[in-house]
Image (cartoon, rainbow, N blue to C red):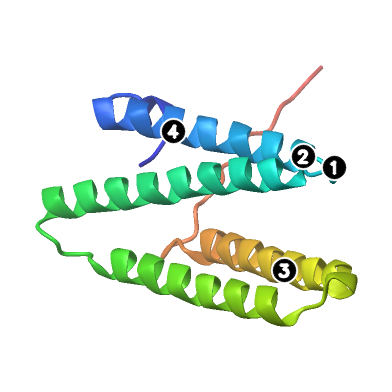
Amino acid sequence: MGTLAEMLSTPLGVVEWFVYLLAAVMFVIGLHLMNSPKTARKGNMVSAIGMAMAVVMAFIVLFAGEVSNGFKHSVAVVVLIVGIVIGAVAGVVSAKKVQMTDMPQLVSVFNTVGGGAAALVAKRKTLGDAEPKRVRYRKLIVD
């Protein structure tokens, strides 16, 4: 969607906004709970539930958009599914192979991948316009 006002103009947009907000709050609470060994499992579960909510909401929004467009842009759904499968396989393999003493290095690698993904999204966003936007400047003359 576009702006927040456009998002909140439909019932699905309102639900989407609240689900994403709740997912973000759950993720932050889960991170806070991971500070202690006693609550780390609970924190991991809270964060995982929040992220699952966000992914399910993304599927719902994509599917609703595709239904209204007549399934013209179904590539987005396929890309989302492929990304989830690749991430799940990488997570399961690394969880099985990496020793607990190597966890900081694994977290570092995951953070690097996340940073790289954010950089690619930013690059796409900045280069995505077919025609560059023109900025007009006016001179301010002060006597």
Vertical side of 70 occupied by 109: above or below: below
What amino acid is found at the position of numbered circle 2 in the picture?
Thr
| First along the sequence among labels 4 and 2 | 4
The amino acid pointed to by label 3 is Phe
- Give the labeled residue for mark 2: 39
Q: Which of 2 and 45 is in front in this view?
A: 45
Question: Which residue type does callout 4 highlight?
Answer: Val
- The residue where tag 3 is placed is 110
The percent position of residue 101, horizontal first and vertical second, equals: 90, 72
> Which residue, given by chain and number where applicable, does mark 4 sit on?
19
Q: Which residue is painted at 47% across and 64% down in the image?
A: 128
> Depth-wise, is mark 1 or mark 3 nearer the camera?
1
Image quadrant containing the N terminus: top left
Between residue 121 and residue 15, name the one nearer to us: 15
Tell me if residue 69 comes above or below residue 85 in the rendering.
above
How far, Cα to Cα, is label 1 from label 2? 8 Å
* First reached walking from the N terminus: tag 3 or tag 4: 4
Q: Are marks 1 and 3 in contact (CB under 8 Å)?
A: no
- Who is closer to the viewer here, 141 or 53? 53
Which badge, 2 or 3, is on the more N-terminal residue? 2
Residue occupying the point 29% across, 52% down: 62
Q: Which badge, 4 or 1, comes first in the chain's sequence?
A: 4
Are discs 4 and 2 less than 8 Å apart at CB?
A: no
Where is residue 76, by image quadrant? Answer: bottom left
Q: Mark 1 highlights which residue?
A: 35
